[in-house]
Amino acid sequence: LAPAALRALHALARRERARLSARGIEIVPPDPPPTRLRLALADPTTRRELGWLVRHATLGFLLGLLGLLLPLCAVRDTTFPLWWRLSPGEATTTSIGIGTAHGWPDALAATLLGVGWTAIVLGLGPGMARLQAAPARRLLVAGPGTDLSLRVAELTATRAAALDAHATELRRIERSLHDGAQNRLVSVTVLLGAARRMAARDPAGADELLERAQSAAEQALAELRQVARGILPPVLADRGLAGALSGLAADCGVPCRVEADVPERCAASVEATAYFVVAEALTNIAKHSGAARASVTARARGGRLRLLVEDDGRGGADEDAGSGLTGIRRRVAALDGTLRLTSPPGGPTVLDVDLPCGR
């Protein structure tokens, strides 16, 4: 019977993990435990599950029973004046077996007790649920070695995403320099050489070439500034993240409201990532969403920076559709942050980014 009993134990533990995970308590499952008795006796996961079963079958059962009976008592006593005349004459007034109703004052007194039960349920219910879940949160999680391996795998994935984002950024900078500023500078060199050769025989033509060279040099300088601004926007150093986000909202093609509560400066890499995330999100909104308005919210609390970019557009945003969301996710993952996208068809679209504020 040992293998069957162990399989039943593991099934109960899996069900409890799934139940708590579905209610917002994330429990990392361990590796599948053994079902042979000799191996199970030496398995730490099986021993933890047995300890959980003992607690859940005693204290957990009592808490679950109270969680069932207290609401029934509250409903029974609160509604007692509605049906007390239909009850037998010797029936007790209250759910705890005390008193007998002989008139309306006795029936209304039971209602007061029902209100008290309701207050107890509302006040103690959440604490009872947390107390019942505490053994599972402590005993049904994976061991330290499993947690470490999961963390290593997570860091490996984020490192790969960071390297991909870095390579993509380098390709973008190289393409901008090659296709823009480099061509302008080559044009300036050619025009200056032609103007030098024409200076003696055709001064007017040489002046025209010099003007064209000056115009090309100015365009090259503007493009170099644009590339430098794409690497690390100087507005972040001048005005901080709140001012930089206000500038992005002012340049957005959709009316955009900014609410920034960032009392302290974050690390330069975090602010740059937040800036580029909002810039890309607002670009997507202007190009693809068809929104009438958008909003950007930035708050820094407890060492974390949270960004919310919302719009009232058509929704249906897809990371696989080439909208830049993949690049945003890679930037966020490179800093060990999280990104959540909610974009049902018909809207609204909400981009929720959480970043560490490490300095």
Image: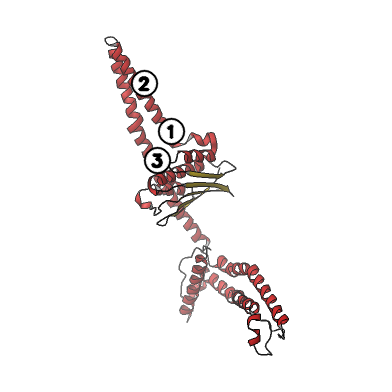
Q: Are marks 3 and 1 in contact (CB under 8 Å)?
A: no
Residue placed most toward the observer, 151 or 346: 346
Ranked by sequence position, the earlier of labels 3 and 1 is 3
Q: Which residue is mark 1?
A: 228
| Foreground tag (3 vs 1) | 1
Query: Up-down: is 326 above or below 172?
Result: below
Query: Up-down: is 347 above or below 85?
Result: above
Residue placed most toward the observer, 97 or 86: 86
Identity, as a three-letter code, of the amino acid under mark 3: Glu
In the displayed structure image, the side of residue 192 where residue 145 appears, left or right:
right
Is disc 3 placed on a helix, strand or loop?
A: helix
Measured Cα–Cα span from mark 1 to mark 2: 21 Å
Task: Give the residue at x 31% y 25%.
Answer: 186
Name the spot of residue 229 as percent of width and height, x first.
44, 34
Q: Is residue 303 visible?
A: no
| Foreground tag (1 vs 2) | 2
Q: Residues within 10 Å of mark 3 (few under 14, many from 20)?
A: some
Is disc 1 placed on a helix, strand or loop?
A: helix
Is disc 2 placed on a helix, strand or loop?
A: helix
Q: Which residue is mark 3?
A: 169
Q: Which numbered circle lies on residue 214?
A: 2
Name the spot of residue 265 as percent of width and height, x first.
57, 41
Q: Is residue 226 visible?
A: yes
Q: Residues within 10 Å of mark 2 (few under 14, many from 20)?
A: some
Identity, as a three-letter code, of the amino acid under mark 2: Gln
Which quarter of the rendered picture does the C terminus lie within? top right
